[in-house]
Amino acid sequence: MAAVPDYDYPYEYDDNFEADFADELAVLDEMEDIPGMSIKPSSQEKSKRSLKFSTPKEKNEVRQNGATPGDRQHQKRDLSAVFELPESDEEDNVVSSASKKRRVMTTASDQADIQDADDDFEITPPSSPDIMAKVQQYRETTGKTADQSTAQTRDSVASGRPALSQSCFLRRPPSGKFVTVTNQDGDRVYLKEHEDTLHDSQKLSGHALPGGRPLQLLSVSFRQLKDQVEEERRKKILAESERITREINRQLDRDLGTEDEEDGGASDKENAGKSAQTGLWVDKFTPSNYTELLSDEGTNRTLLTWLKLWDTAVFGRERKVKKKSADQKKGPFNWLAKRMEEELVQDEDGWKRPQKKVALLCGPPGLGKTTLAHVIAQHAGYNVVEMNASDDRSPEVFKERIEAATQMKAVMGADPRPNCLIIDEIDGAPQAAINVLLDVIKRKDQSGEAGPQGRRRRRREGGVLLRPIICICNDLYVLSLRRLRPLSLVLHFPPTDSTRLAGRLFEIARRQSVRTDLTTLLALCEKTEKDIRSCVNTLQFVHSRGTDLSLSDVHSMAVGQKDQQKGLFTVWQQIFQVPRQKRKRWNNPHDVATGQLQAGEDVSVTQPHTPAGRFQHILHLTSGNGEYEKTCQGLFENYLEAKFKDAYLDAVTMGCDWLGFYDHVNKVISHIQTFVLMRYIPYTFVAFHLLFAGSTAPKLSYPSSQYECFQKMTETQGLRAAQQGEMSAVIRSRVSQSAFLLELLPSLLDIIQPSLRPVNSQLFSAKEKQQMADLIHTMIAYNLTYQQERTQEGQYQYLLEPNMEEAIRFSDQPPKKQLTYAAKQLIAKEIEVEKMRRSEALLMSRNRNLPPTEEKAQKTGQKSDPAAEGAVPNHLAKLQPKKITVAEEKPAVDFFGRVIKKKTPERNKDASSSNSGTSQQVSRAGTGTIYYKFNEGFSNAIRKNIPIQDLL
Amino acid sequence: MHPEFVRRCDSVPAKIVAKKNITVPVLLKSRDSGCCEREHFVVRMSLWVDKYRPTSLNKLSYHTEQAAQLKRLVQNGDFPHLLVFGPSGAGKKTRIMCLLRELYGAGVEKLRIEHHNFTTPSKKKIEITTIASNYHIEVCPSDAGVQDRVVVQELIKMVAQAQQLDSSTQREFKVVLLTEVDRLTKDAQHALRRTMEKYVTTCRLILCCESTSKVIPAIRSRCLGVRVPAPSNEQICSILQTVCKKEGLALPPELASRVADKSGRNLRRAILMLEACKVQQYPFRPDQQVVEADWEVFLRETANAIVSQQSPRRLLEVRGRLYELLTHCIPPDVIIRGLLTELIDSCDGQLKAEVTQWAAYYEHRLQLGSKSIYHLEAFVAKFMSIYKKFLDEGMAAMML
């Protein structure tokens, strides 16, 4: 057992990676049916075919029937292609390249054929170490062969026989039986003993046993197979040669000048000519395996590693962790690797699932996110189930589909592979649907250790998520994704490397015989902002017009430009920054010099550094963004930070005028709904750009102060409303709202803070009592009081309620002197007492049923002579002894309505005999309201109702 | 008596009382008799500004001629719609209440608070608080914001459609007092003009506002305008003296005139300031400090900051201060006016006219727009620009 796959360091670009994944790459390549070229005819075709290969039964059938001889051929050829990549620029003729390939194929054929045929079935799901070892071994030997003895191989080409002996050498002891051989040089190699495949085929079972040991599924003897393969190959060679002859003839018939065709002619199965009509090149040239992916290597690897983490849960295979050597950890990507390492761990629950259950790919359109997801899922041995915006995504349907994809598995179909759900364009899904997804993710397994039985039961109930889900979105920060983000492995898609992209485009162009050059393609890449899809579409468009693509075409074409929304920060950045000269790339100097600007040409694109270009650019940018309000706020917040020369603030004044204009227009729009005026708004931003743009943009901050201001204002208004709401009508009608805050409150807060002697209120002089009473009245009239609150330090303090201090005081002013704690406490208590007294009095007066006229007279009297009235505050007025209205004694009646004779008249006699006021009261209170209550073990206290007025 | 016992005793009735305290006012709102009882206890105004407010036209202490005219106006028991305007603290409301009292007697002073609910055509609920007596209703429609049109229409209809039951003893009409009319939207004002003609038999409108410039001409022409000018400093001084005499305090005339000066001819503020002075220190001293409102101090400091330095950085700081003023609900036009007064003081004579003109310009734009901070900043920037240019020119001239 040699190298063990190591998935832990996706960002360490060690050489091992290729070695580690080589087997998988090989398998992938094997699925491929176009040799040499890293492009395949159509994705549908591909997936179908790859399905076939990975299905053991299907494969056997193929082999038995020999129905598609071409397929095997291609498989082998591809395997070889991995190790001996054909030079694309090679200008070999058709025959020679074909023969060369055949040679390599034959080199590979036997070993690959024999061993891979055995192991193939367990490769399809990710690799096992055995095959790994073999492939690595094989790689080494072939490499050696290529180096050492080209002559030898040439011989073998001539003979048409495979170089069997070399390909069977193994450097390290293989598993199972083997024979050791030492050659003259002292190199020791191992030859594996091949058992009868019949023996293995007895052990028919699923993908793998828990031990991870591969199983053979062949039901046909190996010899038979070999014969079949031999026959197949013969047929294939015949077919191939026939085809090549046809091809050459056809080519000769065509224009001899187009040499480009030859390569494509060799590699394509005569689809080069007709495909232009059949479909989009984007589909046609979609990468079909891992090595062909154009996207960033790091991203690819991370996603693959994440997907591999599911192996334990999905395939029941234990993940093998390679021993980390210390020196591996060094390198520039260490921190990144570390971060990823933290994220890419398996959960410690019963299922050993990855901690992040969902991968979320995000990035601008056209970078190949969907392609990546598909390719990787295929690669890791999953059956891809895709959902996208074209599907119905109501929560019910969404749930149904998620569960169908994650809980179930095709039983009847030919494809028993587990599903991998890819949810494309998830940023457009409704919140409810995403909540469903979240529920599925979060679903916890209560009986994690229940074992397989528990698992089965759980699954029936819609149990834990056991299949990987890959979500794809353009905008990660959509509101609906907010809760999904922390639960998922977020992978940002960096833009594609433009040289790689241009290289691929060049390849496509060559194969489709579009005449162009790399510079042009690079320019195209830049123009489309590295959008692969857009590039390829442009190429196809140019091809369909039957012209060649030149640099000037790229510049003049409106094709490939996206009307993409820019983020707010980008907008602000560009407004505050003068575009650099570098951006001139689109600008054709010749055109500018001669003034031959085409009529329909967009100035903003061709010459962004000229004032006109800048004008158009900003106009385009801001109107494309559309969020005028936010844009404007951002400008307002940041423009004073910008670096501009303005000695007399003329620019600032002008900018402010523009803001005023913006505000005016905006108000008119919102007031009378004249949205026609909307088109004049972006000119404000243009003006700002021309006024304040500098070579470097200032440090931008998100505009929040307007909102904060609004919030605080609402708060202040709320306080005011709270105070005014409970004020009495007379006071309230006197002051308008604005005057209340502007004029009344500042003085009022001073007035209610008189200097009080720090003594008990009982010891106040008459004047002080008067002062206190006034204070209390004022505070009640204006609905103010003090309330005890606990500060953060744990101290108690009295605060105004409602706290108008806050509404009135400004930040930089020294805090005004406050009343002492004791004084405030006293006031608060007095206010409570006074309030109680008033309501009591009110209650009494209502009960007394005084005629309202009397009240009125009393009140008008107060009004006319307030000074006199103020002399005797309410609480100082003596309480008048109340008249006792002796209730007419109703004769007590018994149940039948008969009058009951009184037996105890003594009490009445007592009451009438006493004549002092106090005793009267006591007796009044005593009539029937005294009762005794026996409380166990507490007291035998006498209770009695006392009106509050007696206590105040 | 054991203290524990006492507390236990009073707890029971206290609870009842507390409960009543909550429920009673609610009940009273719909019942006139209850309302007046409540007022009897609650209205104990000890703030001088409330205590010494005149309640009849005869007792007004300034603009007595106007008071006499008003009295003659209502003598025959009828009057047209009125538009009372004048600066804050001049006594508009006092005059209106005196007028109503003249018309209906003391009954108008029995006020109650009512809450009205309206539903807009767009099914939005609005709650408006009104202050009403049996004879009049006072409402500030601009509380409803942009929906004030509904309030104006519905409320006036509601009041006007209810005829007085006994028109022999009472007036035939009720009075609807609309305050802060200048804050009404144009929609509401247009709605008002038809309504005020239609229901003229059963209700009279008294509109109260600070400035007529925001009242549409159609309404102005339908009303009798009554301008209540601010009292002069001397009038304020004499009133302050009267108040002090009634309170039994001695007020030095210097302090009185300083208070009047600081108040900006606003009687309410003058009296409040005087009382604040009294709380601060008594007996009065002529050189006593008159406490100003915090926002005024803040505004002055802002103006000083503008004058001391003119640069984008300083402008940024000023913006922060302007924001703070706005958050304290200081109206932007007050800010711009306050800034102008402060800035002009530190300006050269040549500049004064120009600065004032620009202040007016930006104040106008402020009214046109809705984001006041832009216009405030624009004014500050403009001033900085002008001022700096002027200073540098002056420097250059000195050098030559």
Image (cartoon, helix red, strand yellow):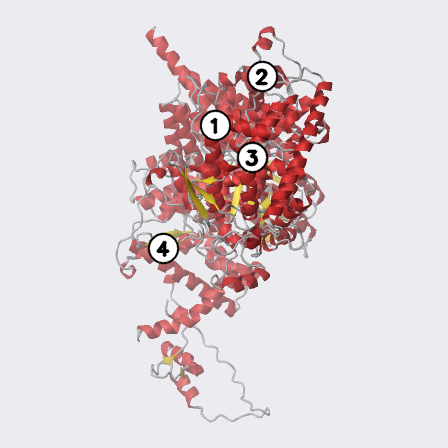
Q: Which mark is residue A566?
A: none
Q: CA distance from mark 1 to mark 3?
A: 15 Å
The chain that hosts pointer 1 is: A
> What secondary structure is found at the residue carrying circle 3?
loop
> Is the residue marked by circle 1 packed among few (<14), some (14-19), or many (20+) residues within 10 Å?
few
**Rendering quarter of residue B66:** top right
Check disc 4 and report the residue beneath it: A789
Q: Which amino acid type is marked by label 1?
A: Ser
Seen in the picture, residue A929 relative to A246 is either above or below; the reply is below
The chain that hosts pointer 3 is: A
* Image depth: mark 2 or mark 1 in front: 1
Asked if badge 1 and badge 3 are on a common chain, one would say yes
* Image depth: mark 3 or mark 4 in front: 3
Asked if badge 3 and badge 2 are on a common chain, one would say yes
Residue A679 vs residue A324: left or right?
Answer: right
> What secondary structure is found at the residue carrying circle 2?
helix
In terms of sequence position, does the residue under pointer 1 or pointer 3 come before the other?
Answer: 1
Q: CA distance from mark 2 to mark 1?
A: 57 Å
Residue at 68% over, 24% down: A541
Residue at 68% over, 57% down: B165
